[in-house]
Image: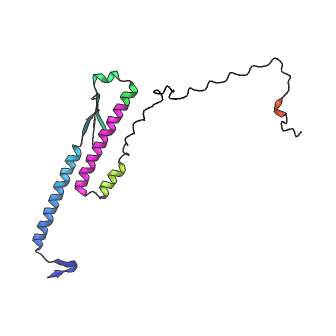
Amino acid sequence: MTVPFGGHVRDPQEWMREQERRSAALLAKAEQAKADLENNVVTLSSPDRLVTVTVNPGGGLTSLSLSPQAQERPPAQLASLIMSTYRKATTRAADRTLEIMAGLTGEDSDAVDFIKSTLPPREEAQPAPEPDDSARFGVPAEPPPAKPRPPRPVSDEDDGEDFQHVDWTGRS
C-alpha cells in the first residue's frame, strides 16, 4: 500500500527505532561539536618566538608571554608583534570554530553564516614596500622641506599709506 508523496507504509515500530537512531546520532554529533568548541584553544608564537599568545574559542586573550629577548625590542615594535600574533591566533580559532559548526550544521547553514557575520575582517597581507633606488643614484629619497621665509623687515619710513583701500585696477 502506498501513501501520499510516494511513501510506503512500514512497520511503525521500525520507523520509531530509525528515528531514535537518527536522534541519538545527532545528539552524539552535537556533544562532540560542543567538546571540540570548548577545546578550541589556540596557542601561537611569533616567528621569532619573542611573543606567545593563547586565545579561547571566542578570540579572548587568555595568556601572553614574552621571551627575555623581547625587552631588546622598541616598545612600538613589540606592541605590533603582539597584536600581529594575537590576530593570527584569533583567525585560527575562528577558522576552527567554522569548521566545527560546518561539520555539525553544514557549510551553507544559517548558523555558519551567522558565525561568519560576527568575525572581524581578515587581515590582508600588506605588499612589501618597493625598494628606494634614490640613494643608489645619489638623489635624496624625499626633497628637503622648504625653509620658511624670514619675515619682511619693517621699514622705518612708514608713510602711513594704507594699501588695503587702493584700487589697483586703475578704474578709480
Q: Residue furthest top?
A: 156
Relative to 92, is 112 above or below? below
- At 13% from the left edge and 70% from the top edge, which residue is drawn? 15
Query: In the displayed image of the protein, which residue is found farthest to the bottom?
Result: 1
* Viewer can see residue 163: yes
Q: Residue at x 25, y 54 (%)?
A: 102
**Residue 9, percent from left and from top:** 14, 77
| Screen quadrant of the C terminus | top right
Q: Nearer the viewer, residue 100 or 11?
A: 100
As for residue 142 lying within the magenta part, the answer is: no
Q: Residue 42 in the image: state x and y as whole percent.
A: 25, 39
Q: Which residues are magenta?
A: 80-109
Q: Quadrant of residue 10?
A: bottom left
Percent x, y for residue 54? Answer: 27, 35
Quarter of the image for the N terminus: give it. bottom left
Q: Is residue 7 above or below residue 152?
A: below
